[in-house]
Image: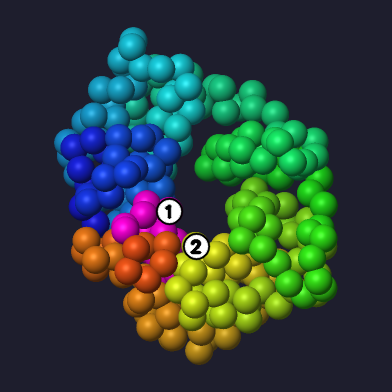
Amino acid sequence: MAFTREGLVNKVPVQMGTLRATYQAARALTASGQPEKAPQWLTDELVRLGSDPELDAADEIPLAMVCHRLQLDCGSRADKGTQRIGRLRVPEQLVPGNERLWQDAMTARAEFQMGCPRTQVRRENLPYGTSSPQFLMILRTLGESDCTTQVQELARGIDLVALARDTLKKGEIVQGSDALQAAIAAGRVIPQRMWQEMPDLVNNNRAPEGRDLFSKFAGGPASSQATAAGYYLLA
């Protein structure tokens, strides 16, 4: 995996320069067991940002998350981000209008393994046994936060393993990864054959910019989110 000097996976111009995207790149590296492959100039830049008085306060949290993921000591600004994450409060209920706040708080807490917060999520109002990309992302997020009981209850009646295979066959790599992670969190058994098929299932999502990158759909541009999903599925 290659990085730009703006701090993101190489050849992803629409997402260059954001710490959020850099965090996704860091997740891809750790999913593939290669955190040490983060280039020196990138780690140096993260450490520099950690003592930059002009760093926007809003960037302290994603900086802390990237540095934690890559096991870096990034200084006082990252430390402040870690402290802010410790004070984060997840909305008591996920409702229309607070989805971004809920997702950001859950993801930050999960990075630091802070456990399952007190939060409620309602089941989707969809035909029994079906799901949506948004709901799969919610299930995956709950699973990352060790909210196992909620994932099991919310996923009741949904064949997450079959859904993961079907979405991957359609080239929907992010949804497929979310479904598979949700299945694991819910305690579903993943057939060994599916892991053996995984290289073929994700092959169509290889990005035209390079085979070490993935796109959200076949033939689309490289995406840090899709790349993180691809590396997780191939881990």
Q: How far apart are marks 2 and 1 (CA)?
A: 7 Å
> Magenta segment, which residues?
221-234
Nearer the observer, 102 or 148: 102
Amino acid type at mark 1: Gln
Label drawn at residue 225: 1
User: Would residue 71 be visible to someone looking at this image?
Assistant: no
2 and 1 marks in contact (CB < 8 Å) = yes
Quick check: is 229 in the magenta stretch? yes
> In the rendered image, which residue does mark 2 sit on?
174
Where's the N terminus, which quadrant?
Answer: bottom left
- Quadrant for residue 74, please give it: top left
Q: Quadrant of residue 101?
A: top right
Residue at (64%, 48%) from the top-left corner? 145
Which amino acid type is marked by label 2? Answer: Val
Q: Magenta residues: mostly which secondary structure?
A: helix
How many C-alpha atoms fall within 10 Å of the one at disc 2: few (<14), some, or many (≥20)? many
Residue farthest to the front?
Answer: 219
How busy is the neighbourhood of tag 1: few (under 14 within 10 Å), some, or many (20 plus)? many
Residue 178 position within the rendered picture, expressed as x and y whole percent measured from the top left: 57, 63
Instruction: Tell me residue 194's x, y (percent).
Output: 51, 84
